[in-house]
Structure formats: C-alpha cells, structure tokens
C-alpha cells in the first residue's frame, strides 16, 4: 500500500512522559483503562512506559500490550543493552511492538551528562539501534535535547541510526528551548540533508517550557515531520508536553496545511476529564480545546456577536471535541442580548422596556454576586411580574 504523504501519525506519551509528573502515577489497571480509551481515540502509537525503571512499569507495558489491538505499543529505553532487553521482554505480547531508544545529542548533554565525546555518543546510538533491531523491527530513535544540538552533528547522528535500522527518528526539543522557526528549520535541514531520510519518519517531541510546544510541533510538521508526540491535556515534565488535542484541532481547523490524522476528535473532552481525574492533575479553565472556559462567552461584545452568528466568536464547534455545549456566562460584563437569550431559554419573552428594566436589576445583582444562575434570573423576573 502506498504511504499517504499527508498523514500525520499521533504518538501518545501520556502514560510515559505524562506519568513521570510527581503525583500523576497510575496503577496498571488505570493505565489499561486509559490505553483502551487512547485506542478508541485513534492514536497510532501508545508509549506504554519505561520498562527497566520499575517492575510496575514493566508490568504495565506487558498488560497494555495484551489489552490493545490497533495501536503500536512502544517501550522507552536508554541506549544500553539492559534497558533494551527489558523493553523487548515487556513487549512480547504486543501485536505491533516498537522500541524507543536514544541518547543525548547536544554538546551540553554529551559533555555534562555523559562526560563523553560526539564520536563515542554516535557509536553508542548506532549500537543501541542495532541491538534493538535484532528483536524488534520497528525502532524509534530519540536524539535527546536535539533542540539545542548542533544541526550538522544531529544530521550525522540521524543518518547513522537510520542506516542501523531506525524506522522513526525523534527530534525532541527536550527543554522546550526552540522558537518555532528554529525548530522548523532544524527539521527542514534534516529532511534536505540526510541522505537516507526517506527511509524513516521524522517525529516531533516538544516540551512547553516557553509555552511553545504546540507551535513548535506544528512548525515541525510544516517542514516535513510526519509524527507528533504529545499527551492529553499537555501533561508532562515541568511545564508539560505538546497537547495532542491542540495539534489535532489545528490540523483540522487549518485545512490549508493539507495534513490529517486518524483521531476521532469527538472523544477529546471525555478523555481529558478522565486523565484529569485519574492523574489528579487539574486542567486550567482557559486551556485550549478542553478547558472549562474553552467555549464560554462572557463579555457583552462577544456574547452579542456570538448570538448573532456563532462563527463570529467560535472557530471550533464544541461538539467536534465532545464538549457539552457553548455557554453564555452571565456576569456584570454581559449585555442585554445575553440576558434576553437566557430569559427566553427560561420561557420569558420581554418587550424592550421590560428588558431594559430587567437588565438594570441584573447589573446590580451581577455586581454583587459573581455567579448568576437560573434561580437568580427567575427571582429577577418574578419580582418584576409581581410589581406589574
Ligand atoms: O523529552 C525528551 O527528550 C524525551 C525523550 C526520552 C524522548 O522524553
Ligand atoms: Zn519528553
């Protein structure tokens, strides 16, 4: 079958990079439940854990491998035989196993983490890929801290690991350092200068230290990457990873990019809530796509425009991400149009004068009370009807 050049593979690492967050640890049954939901969402690859790190993580990779059918199940390793052996063993029930091995690629990591040289690190990278390839066909190589790596050296490393058998090359911006054009150019450079790049898929794995993880991932895709790595709700080390829901909805919203995924976006909200609860990690209300306020309109100007035509202030339909519905929140910043909308919803059709009067009472109430609910509105109108 011919490979679709515009298809973007989605690699979910909620259960690995996401689960590394203090306080977010999950039991194996909880991980299985999430993995099954990720399968229904349509992710292509589930990174199920780092098997050598603990017996619990090893067991989770085994059980997730048994529990899901469609997605590739991936296990993380460092570039050493012990890690790779553990990963191979943990993946023995996976229908589509993948080993994700790698090593630092920036001079910072080479000198100050590995106390090594570029040449030695290159050798270790190649050895790790060859060692893993004996047992598993699908090998993803990560060049850790690629965001800060010298691009010529990175290209050499990528070429060498592809020759050794890597099927996917992951170019992580481990520290969330890059600007979108820097990261995009790095991916473009690899695409244009690595001789055997057509033998592998380039993957983007961005962290959010400067709030640029999603922008950098998109820049990577625009420059030739075809796999994106991230987590639901953007959870992950420090400021988190790229939010899968953001990247997918950007690709859907900007059809001109010409890229698509296999994701059923209607499942995003429910899964986001599940991750929030199970991982005990709240979602900020203004979080794009899945935050409580993502489809809440609260200022008078926006509410008026939204009620005239929702597209005035809505670029994504809430139902497209499984969000219950858009809301018109009543606050002291709301206008008459919003009040009229809510009163009509409750069955009250007021004329212009009645509405003006109700609006004045509403403003007094809204200044005194932050949260205006249906009971408040009813008392507002009931009071007026008694007066009449
Ligand atoms: O951020 C990173 O570099 C990673 C690798 C282990 C892929 O998570
Ligand atoms: Zn990471």
Image: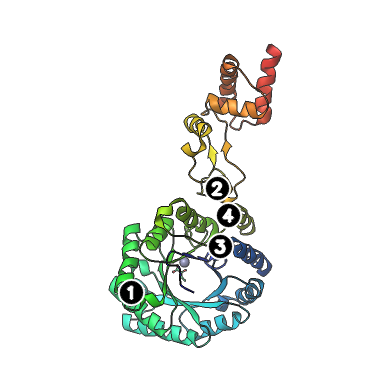
Q: Which mark is residue 291?
A: 2
Mark 4 near mark 3, Cβ–Cβ under 8 Å? no
Structural distance between the alpha carbons of marks 3 and 2? 22 Å
Tag 3 or tag 1, which sits nearer the N-term?
A: 3
Task: Tell me the residue that label 1 is attached to.
Answer: 154
Left or right: 301 with respect to 363? left
Q: Residue under label 3, please give it.
A: 22
Q: Secondary structure at mark 1?
A: helix
Which numbered disc, 2 or 4, marks the residue that appears first in the sequence? 4
Does the closest atom of ligand 2 sit within 8 Å of the Cβ of label 3?
A: no
Task: Note whether residue 209 is visible.
Answer: no
Please say if 119 is above or below 171: below
Q: Is residue 34 above or below residue 293?
A: below
Q: Residue at x 43, y 56 (%)?
A: 214
Residue 26, quarter of the rendered image: bottom right
Frontmost residue, 235 versus 6: 6
Q: Secondary structure at mark 4?
A: helix
Badge number at residue 268: 4
Q: Is residue 264 left or right of residue 252?
A: right
Q: Secondary structure at mark 2?
A: loop
Numbered disc in front, either 1 or 3:
1
Residue 153: x and y in percent read 30, 76
* Spot occupied by residue 9 in the image (x, y as percentages of width and height): 49, 66
């Amino acid at each position: 079958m011919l490979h679709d050049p515009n298809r973007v593979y989605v690699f979910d690492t909620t259960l690995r990079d996401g689960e590394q967050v203090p306080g977010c640890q999950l039991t194996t049954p909880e991980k299985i439940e999430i993995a099954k939901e990720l399968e229904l969402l349509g992710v292509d690859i589930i990174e199920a854990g780092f098997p050598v790190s603990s017996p619990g993580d090893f067991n989770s990779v085994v059980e997730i491998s048994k529990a899901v059918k469609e997605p590739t199940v991936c296990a993380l390793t460092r570039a050493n035989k012990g890690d790779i052996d553990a990963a191979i063993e943990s993946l023995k029930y996976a229908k589509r196993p993948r080993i994700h091995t790698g090593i630092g690629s920036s001079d910072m990591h080479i000198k100050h983490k590995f106390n090594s040289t570029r040449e030695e690190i290159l050798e270790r990278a190649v050895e790790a890929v060859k060692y893993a390839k004996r047992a598993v066909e699908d090998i993803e190589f990560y060049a850790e801290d690629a965001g800060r790596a010298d691009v010529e050296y990175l290209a050499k490393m990528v070429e060498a690991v592809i020759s050794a058998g890597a099927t996917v090359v992951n170019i992580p911006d481990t520290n969330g350092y890059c600007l979108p054009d820097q990261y995009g150019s790095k991916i473009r450079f690899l695409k244009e200068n690595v001789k055997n790049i057509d033998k592998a898929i380039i993957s983007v794995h961005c962290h959010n230290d400067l709030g640029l993880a999603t922008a950098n991932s998109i820049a990577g895709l625009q420059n030739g990457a075809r796999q994106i790595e991230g987590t639901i709700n953007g959870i992950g080390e420090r400021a988190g990873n790229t939010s899968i829901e953001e990247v997918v909805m950007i690709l859907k919203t900007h059809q001109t990019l010409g890229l698509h995924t296999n994701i059923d976006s209607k499942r995003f909200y429910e899964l986001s809530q599940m991750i929030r609860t199970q991982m005990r990690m709240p979602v900020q209300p203004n979080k794009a796509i899945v935050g409580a306020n993502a489809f809440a309109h609260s200022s008078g100007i926006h509410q008026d425009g939204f009620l005239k035509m929702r597209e005035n202030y809505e670029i994504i339909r809430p139902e497209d991400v499984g969000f219950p519905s858009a809301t018109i929140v009543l606050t002291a910043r709301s206008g008459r149009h919003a009040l009229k909308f809510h009163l009509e919803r409750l069955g009250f059709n007021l004329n212009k004068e009645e509405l003006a009067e109700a609006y004045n009472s509403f403003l007094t109430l809204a200044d005194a009370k932050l949260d205006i609910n249906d009971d408040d509105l009813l008392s507002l109108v009931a009071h007026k009807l008694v007066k009449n």
